[in-house]
Image (cartoon, rainbow, N blue to C red):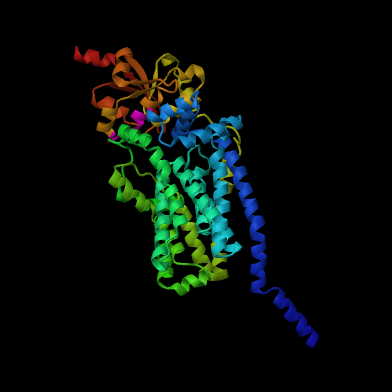
Amino acid sequence: MQDHQVSANDRESHFSPRQLNLDLDRLAVPALAALTAYGLVRGVFTAASTPFWYDEICTRIVVKQPTVSAMYDALRHAADSNPPVFYLLERFSAALVKNEHIAFRLPSIVGFAIVVLCVFLVVKTRSNPAVAFVCTAALFMTSLYEPYATEARPYSLVAACISFGLLCYQRAPATGWMCFLGISLALGEALHYYAIFSIVPFCAAEGAFLLRTRQFRLKVWLALICGFLPLVVFWPLLTQFKAYYGAHPWAPPAIANITPIYGWFFHTSTPIGIGIAAVLSVFILMALIWPSMASNYAADTSSHEPVLALVFLALPFIGFAATKIGHGMMINRYALPSVLGIVMACGYLLHWSGRKGVTVFAVFVFSVVAFQERSFWVTHRGHLAAVHSPAEDLERILNSLTRYRDLPVVVSDGLDYLPMAYYALPDQARHFVSVVDPVGSVTYQGNDSVEKSLLALRSYSPLQVYAFSDFVSGHRMFLLYSRGGPFDWWPTRLVREGYSLRTVVADQNVKVYLVDMEDISRSER
């Protein structure tokens, strides 16, 4: 009887919660490796199956200039908006891989893998591997993963630099780590000008450390200063870009657009995003007010690290304030590093909530991610590694309009025109035209960003972009393709100014009009 009791006790000890936690901790590292590998594979398939959109084609146009000096000249004339280092990196990647859709997106794919690894290590340092893995998996629910982990733009790379900077900052003030901190912050700023906002949380955290301990860590402050150096170096490019676009930007900062960013992080327009950020912020503030709560998180946690997470959570508001003062643009994706603050804050909350809280959160995260990824593979199974041309539908429509086959086709929305011009078959591409009028664009939609962008790009790529007055003087009749996009204002203008628009194709939200200038001449006579 006694032996039986001992055996039962042994079994109970073997399946104790402590042993279960140890088993979960051991599984976290191989699970992280599998998750990272999946992200890389999925990223390659996504890149190979997704056409470039407007901004990515801007990247390609700059990178494909014949020389580095020509590339710099394109930036100097506002052909695109990022610092030169980003295009040098893309140029290097384009030389490695033959498939352009993979080549130009490969830096972002690798960048997201770096974010995954760094976030795991950052959270693990102040918690345990199981919590760190669950928090890292939550990245796959965010906009940082879909779509920006596979986009030929610098946002994923900036997040990689900042997440590595977080890892370095946790090891302050070790000299080697502070050198890496300075390099990572400087590289982030050299990839995107708005990365400067991500240095603010580090400065705030180090300021909190200084106030609490009265210790001025010179090496840390020098590393933070390094992050500002690329802005100084590339300031002339930034000022020229701002001078070109600054008068009527398409995304001026507005306080009403800030809180929806938190929902956008999680692909939703509901208040859930701002709710998550608010709950996490309240918890961090509580941890700052009651140190015993922070000590429950980790014995060596000091007050400056919760400040770091809190200010990262506030990045959309910091970006709004800075761009409002500087008369710049504020777009959702410029605040993407705020996702890192959300993940850090989740690490606090999960470690404090215990094993049950971690389990519930893990079930939620993996359910959402599993559903999301299943939808992706089901949607793409018919064209994995095959790009559907954005020009295909318009080409099909034009082939059916044999009567008007020789007429030029004005693509009303500039965001539609650039991908169509890039992907169209050569015999069709020569018919696709974009007409621009910056003054009229300001009148009808309040900004001229796309108009000016196309004017800048046409000097560095064989695009058929014409001033409206020049185009209509040589073409009395043309087709107008309208899809109702955000910059699709030409039908409204032509109608208001008395031009004749006759619908020749109406397919859901797509319309093709025949614009006949002779009707105006006859009415004037």
Residue 464 visible (yes or no): yes
**Residue lying furthest left:** 525
Q: Residue at x 50, y 18 (%)?
A: 426
Q: Position of residue 493 (x, y in %)?
A: 27, 27
How many marks are shown on the rendered structure? 0
Residue 415 vertical placement versus 375 (above, below): above
Residue 472 vertical placement versus 250 (above, below): above
Q: Residue at x 47, y 72 (%)?
A: 293
* Quadrant the C terminus occupies: top left
Highlighted magenta segment, given as a residue range: 445-454
Residue 448 visible (yes or no): no
Residue 202, image quadrant: bottom left
Q: Position of residue 280 (x, y in %)?
A: 43, 63
Q: Position of residue 346 (x, y in %)?
A: 49, 61
Foreground: 71 or 340?
Answer: 71
**Residue lying furthest bottom:** 1
Magenta segment: does it hold 447? yes
Foreground: 41 or 216?
Answer: 216
* Quadrant the N terminus occupies: bottom right
Q: Position of residue 122 (x, y in %)?
A: 54, 58
Foreground: 121 or 236?
Answer: 236
Residue 372 vertical placement versus 64 (above, below): below
**Dominant secondary structure of the residues highlighted in magenta in the image:** helix
Q: Residue at x 49, y 65 (%)?
A: 348
Magenta segment: does it hold 96? no
Q: Residue at x 31, y 21 (%)?
A: 468
Residue 42, image quadrant: top right
